[in-house]
Image (cartoon, rainbow, N blue to C red):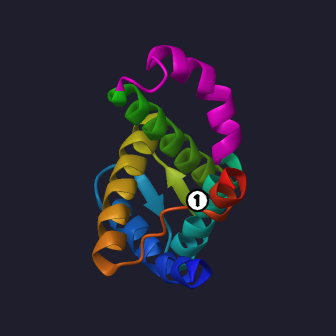
């Protein structure tokens, strides 16, 4: 069922990317085809790179959040990972660009994450665990 939900999420996330591009955030996407490809790449990067990024940032997170006791620090690190994945996708895909660099990456990633999460929950398409997380977690 997870694969089917992911396929249903794909056009929703692409539409959200087009919405983000329509806002004055500096995110530019050439069309729906590029948005579909971008949604796939962001998802794949999140699946493939989330654990390596967390391993690299883990010691800093553990110290600054006192092992997870300070929730805002955990939120900040999750937000940082989202920004990195969003910027990396823009760098990899022709037709998806960040006109104002880091500023556009930060604003675009946050708006994309918030709207995507809200819409996917509204439509009942949210998948709580990725396959990688399920495999690693047992």
Report the residue at 28% width, 53% height from top: 24
Residue 102 seen in this snapshot = yes
Task: Say if the magenta span includes residue 65.
Answer: yes
| Residue 87: image location, x then y, percent | 55, 45
Looking at the figure, which quarter contains the N terminus? bottom right
Q: Residues within 10 Å of mark 1 (few under 14, many from 20)?
A: some
Looking at the figure, which quarter contains the C terminus? bottom right
| Residue 129: image location, x then y, percent | 55, 61
Q: Main secondary structure of the magenta part?
A: helix
| Residue 70: image location, x then y, percent | 36, 23
Report the residue at 46% width, 16% height from top: 64
Report the residue at 52% width, 77% height from top: 10
Q: Nearer the viewer, residue 81 or 35?
A: 81
Q: Which residues are magenta?
A: 50-70
Residue 46 lies in what quarter of the image? bottom right
Q: Secondary structure at mark 1?
A: helix
Total marks placed: 1
Left or right of 63: which side holds 108? left
Task: Say if the magenta span includes residue 135.
Answer: no
| Residue 131: image location, x then y, percent | 66, 64
Q: Nearer the viewer, residue 6 or 23?
A: 6
Left or right of 84: which side holds 45? right
In the rendered view, would you say 35 is above or below 100? below
Residue 93 seen in this snapshot = no
Residue 7 lies in what quarter of the image? bottom right
Residue for badge 1: 42
Left or right of 49: which side holds 95? left
């Amino acid at each position: 069922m997870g694969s089917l939900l992911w396929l249903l999420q794909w056009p929703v996330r692409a539409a959200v990317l087009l919405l983000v591009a329509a806002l004055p955030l500096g995110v530019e996407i050439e069309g729906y085809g590029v948005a579909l490809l971008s949604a796939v790449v962001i998802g794949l990067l999140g699946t493939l790179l989330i654990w390596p990024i967390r391993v690299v940032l883990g010691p800093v997170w553990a110290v600054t959040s006192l092992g997870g006791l300070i929730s805002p620090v955990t939120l900040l690190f999750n937000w940082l990972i989202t920004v990195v994945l969003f910027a990396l996708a823009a760098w990899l895909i022709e037709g998806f660009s960040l006109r104002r660099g880091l500023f556009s990456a930060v604003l675009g990633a946050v708006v994309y994450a918030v709207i995507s999460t809200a819409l996917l929950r509204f439509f009942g398409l949210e998948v709580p665990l990725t396959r990688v997380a399920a495999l690693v977690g047992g």
